[in-house]
Image (cartoon, rainbow, N blue to C red):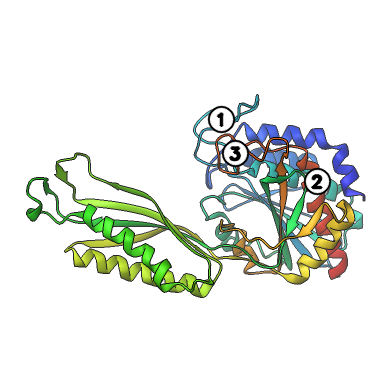
Amino acid sequence: MDYLKRAMEIKEEIIANRRYLHQIPELGMELPKTSGFVVEKLKEMGYEPKLISGYGVTATVGKKTDGKVILLRADMDALPMEEESGLPFAAKGKCAHTCGHDLHTAMLLAAAKMLKESEEELEGIVKLVFQPGEETLEGAKALIADGILENPKVDAAMAAHVIPLLPTGFIGYNKGVVAASADYFIITLHGLGSHGACPQLSIDPINMGVHLHLALQELVSREANPEEMVVLTVGKFQSGAAGNVIPEKAVLEGTLRTFNEEVRSYMLKRIQEVTDGVASTFRGSAEIKYKGSVCSLSIDSQMADIIGEALKEMLGEKGVAQVSQRMSGSEDFAEIAAKVPSMFFIIGTGSAEEGYCYGGHHPKVIFNEDCLPIGAAAYAQGAARWLERAK
């Protein structure tokens, strides 16, 4: 099948699906409306979808059971923020698809339709996965724990992400580590409250927090190899309710990111040691909890070569390129890529005329829907070609 031609023929259908999904954003692992829509559409195509990890959806296509199995994954969850795009189909409420997961879901639904239509041509099995909980870094782990890589056993996997700061339709990919690990920490510092006029009677958690924030930054500047990318950001610091009262506790929330798993392990160990040390120095105590974590995303070179060439044949040398950039952002597809050889690519959704105004996770971001058939065709073409080469 000419997947790009077919995707262009069903472009309006893909756009309609995306716009519907855009108006029903849901968060984390609880996606009843989104999941229900995906199940309904897959059944219309002739699939027998199953739920996994609560509201995840999976289905398979392909009749040659003696071939390999490739998993195609799209994430479905939104972000806890209000949309300010001004679009007529903008989400109304406290959450929105400002990361583009609605596009990913619509693309994979279109790929599913085309793969079903060309099922006789497939040299193996394609396992489709629509995943909840990517933004909370819990979805991929839940899928793996619930057996997504088994029955049938998955030999390889592929996923994609839209990027609004690149030209619409451009596809980029890289090899090796392409996205950072992420560990979201919550540090609670416990002290002793008192009147602000009597600090000697207190154990001041704000004082602890100020020193801790500075000490954590020293881990990057003094203990990390300058050649390694390490980001340690504290984005939330909350304590107290009145200017003349020393509170009993302070809370710092932040994230650690790096491309190197050894560096990651070292930094997590040092965060614990420094936190305990600072708290005890000022006569307090501390506890650290991790809200979410994911390893760095590593791409298999052979898969990248096979699928990259297939996409270049479809879109031309100017439409697809291996890029050198790596993302300091994280992607929980990394947990699947750590288990099976995987390919990950990015799809541009921006407009040069508009100057690439807003990136993902911005309330005003707008994704150019012309990318939808290209992404759908890339999913289908990549899977079909890999099965052909891997048989």
Residue type for callout 2: Ile
Q: Mark 2 = which residue? A: 374
Question: For mark 1, what is the residue?
Answer: 84
For the residues marked 2 and 1, what is the alpha-carbon distance in whole angstroms?
26 Å
Type of amino acid at the residue the image marks with label 1 = Glu
Question: What is the CA distance from the residue labelled 1 to the residue labelled 3?
Answer: 11 Å
Residue 124 in view of the camera: no
Give the camera-side residue of 132 and 286.
286
Say which of 223 and 18 sits in front.
223
- Mark number, residue 97: 3
Closer to the camera: disc 2 or disc 1? 1
Q: Residue at x 81, y 58 (%)?
A: 382
In the structure shown, which secondary structural element does the residue marked by tag 1 occupy?
A: loop
Pointers 1 and 3 in contact (C-beta within 8 Å): no
Along the horizontal axis of the image, is 290 left or right of 50?
left
State the image coordinates of residue 129 (x, y, percent, origin top left): 68, 53
Q: Quadrant of residue 215?
A: bottom left
Q: Position of residue 83 (x, y in %)?
A: 55, 32
Q: Quadrant of residue 154?
A: bottom right
| Residue 102 as seen in the image, left or right of residue 224 | right
Neighbor class of circle 2 (other Cα within 10 Å; few <14, some 14-19, many 20+) is many
Residue 333 as seen in the image, left or right of residue 241: right
Q: Secondary structure at mark 2?
A: helix
Looking at the rendered structure, the kind of residue marked 3 is His
Quarter containing the C terminus: bottom right
- Name the residue at the top extreme: 88
Q: Residue 352: where, in percent of width, then height?
A: 73, 40
